[in-house]
Each structure stands twice: as C-alpha cells, then as structure tokens.
Amino acid sequence: MRSLDPYVPGEQPQDQQYVKLNTNESPYPPSPKVEQAIHNFDINTLRLYPDPESLELRSALATQHNLVAEQVFVGNGSDEVLAHCFQAFFQQSSALLFPDISYSFYPVYCALYKIEYQQIALDDSFEINIDDYRQAHGGIILPNPNAPTGIALPLDSIRRLLEASDSVVVIDEAYVDFGAESADSLIDRYDNLLVTQTFSKSRSLAGLRLGYALGHSDLIEALNRVKNSFNSYPIDRMASIAAIASVNDQSYIEACNQKVIDSRNRLSESLLQIGFKVFPSSSNFIFVEHKTAAAAELYQALKQRGILVRYFKSTRIDNCLRITVGTDEQCHQLVQALASILES
Ligand SMILES: *Cc1c(COP(=O)(O)O)cnc(C)c1O
C-alpha cells in the first residue's frame, strides 16, 4: 500500500466561501421531487437494512433507458461502479487501453488491482482516434464526452470501437447529458458494452453518491459478484428514495441541463474574446488554454480572488484549465476576474 499513489479529488478549501468551478458539480438544486421524497421519508425504516438488490431503483433506471432491471447495476457513486468494473473485467493477460488524457482515476484503479495498461495518445486537437485502439488488448475504457477535454465522440465511433473489440468496453458517460449521445441504445446489440452514468453531475446529486452501469445481464451478474464480495448494501434507503424521485422528474433535469448548455456556450464565447482557446465542449465544463498567460498562474490568481478552477499539472495539459460551468452570475464573475488578471 505504501507504493500506491491515490486519486486526488478537486480541492474543497474551508477557509472562505469560493465560487466553486473545480469539480463539475451542478450549480442548480436537485429536483423539487427529491426534496419532497426526503421530506416524506419515514425515519423509522432506517432501523432496517435496505434492499441489497436495490430493485426499485434499478427498475426505475431500466425503464428510463429502455432496458430491464437485469441490465442495470447501481453503486455508491460511479467511481465505486468503475472500481468494480476494473476488478471484474480488466485483470487480463493483455493491457487495458485508455486515452493518455482522460479521467485520472483510471490509472489509480489499475495500480490498486495490478492491471497492466497502455495509454493511447489523443491527437493534437485532443481528439480520440478509434483506429488507434485496433491492437491486442484486455479491455477498453473511455469517458464520452472525454474528461478533462469535454470533447465527445459520435455514436458511430463507439460502434466501430465495439466491432473491433472482443473484450469489455466501458463507456464512462458521466457528462453525456450535456450534449453527447448515449451508447445505451447499443446495449442490446453488443454484449461486451458497459455504459456507466452518475447522479453527481446532470442530476445535481453529487452529495448523494449514486452511480450505475448498464449492460448485458452477464456483465451485470459479474459486477454483482464483486459487489456482494465487498459490501451488500451500497445504496442506503434515503439515497434510493431520492434517486427514484430524480429519475421520475426527467423534465426538470433536462431544463437544468439546457441552462448549463446555454451558459457554457456564452462562457466559451466570452473567453474566446479575451484570448483563450476553448476546446469544443459537450460537457458541463470547458477546457481552455490562454494564448500568452500561463495556466498555473491564472489558477493561482483566480484562487486569490475566491474562484476555484481545476489545474492539472500533467504533461500535455499543464497549460490548460478545466472550468465548471456555473450559473450565469458565476460565469460573469469568472470572466471579469480573468479579464482583470490578464490586464494587470
Ligand atoms: C465525476 C466523474 C465520475 C464519478 O462520479 P461519481 O460522483 O463517483 O458518481 C466518473 N467518471 C468521470 C469521467 C467523472 O468526471
């Protein structure tokens, strides 16, 4: 364990109130139906263990995705679901493939479960080229849209990836609701496809800890074996009730997501005007690089002004910032701060 290098989530400093644009949370509250469900929750039921199968929640998710409950797995955040996927599917004799610029939790799971991996370089515009994945492998995982670039792959590329693989392919759709196309429609055709989603971003429920996987019932069965060898009850009663209420208020969620998309497009335009290159985002964050100013310095200067954004000190992206799309007011504050920093 001494040699492990754990994942470091975005900072949550407590010394003052920050405009928090560093962990891709939603700026909008959860659905009012979630509030109602928690308000009406019968505290007395907390005496009892929850349903270990989370059948009611899985059924609600199955209905929403045109699947059956046997094709749905739920976990305590999609990070937990991803951890189970790595353990269940990727301990193979060939390397797991994922992009060199991607979710930085993937190499951490590989180290934990001793999984061999190979990172496939994005091209110079930070795009994924599917043909680069046509080589011997023990599995593939990629976020769509990718993080931290925000760039989405079309469904046709995912289909070509699935055709070219005999192994399990995990598409991590943490940000799919902000403008990309879900691969959930391909599940009945490809038994090696697993799609993961989360309640943390588009459903404004990062504090509830709920994520899920969709795929062939055999893959879900494998995840259940891992889960039941680890924790029988990852979803508590209150989380389950709140999550079901959220699934049943799709129109509220879609309205919030549309607001985020509109703000994102306006924010991208404003940053373009003050000298930023903005990568084309289909997410609730944008990935930017300034023509002259260094990202590390912009990050520090913003923090001093009470605005948090994410800076990754890793190769190829150490001059970029990842900025969560906040409310229009928060975006305005960010643009004002950046403009004033760039002038000084
Ligand atoms: C946020 C995120 C997750 C994890 O979300 P949970 O809060 O654990 O559900 C998974 N993958 C990517 C790419 C993310 O950005």
Image (spheres, helix red, strand yellow):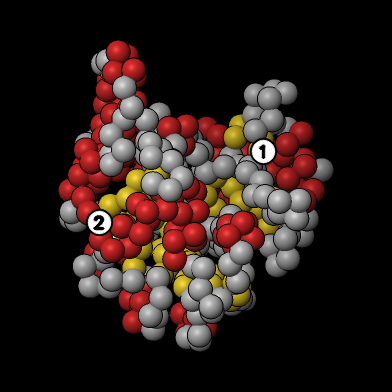
The amino acid type, in three-letter code, at marker 1 is: Glu
**Does residue 164 sit above or below 301 in this rendering?**
below
Task: Judge by depth and name the residue closer to the eye, 143 or 211.
Answer: 211
Residue at the location (46% across, 80% down)?
130
Q: Is mark 2 within 8 Å of ligand 1?
A: no
Picture residue at 71% right of the left edge, 51% below the top: 1
Helix, strand or loop at label 1? It is loop
**Residue 189, relative to residue 248: is it above or below?**
below
Q: Answer with mark 1 or mark 2, whichever residue precedes in sequence.
A: 1
User: Distance between the Cα atoms at labels 1 and 2?
Assistant: 35 Å
**Is residue 127 left or right of 260 when viewed as pictured?**
right
Specify the quadrant of the image occupied by residue 184.
bottom left
Q: Which residue is mark 2?
A: 71
Quadrant in the picture for residue 101: bottom right
Q: Position of residue 100 (x, y in %)?
A: 62, 69
Q: Can the viewer see residue 270?
A: yes
Which disc number belongs to residue 11? 1
Residue 249: which quarter of the image? top left
Q: Amino acid at mark 2?
A: Gln
Residue shown at 47% from the left, 71% from the top: 140
Q: Is mark 1 within 8 Å of ligand 1?
A: no
Quadrant where the image shows the C terminus: top right
Q: Position of residue 28 (x, y in %)?
A: 42, 32
Q: Is residue 62 left or right of residue 228?
A: left
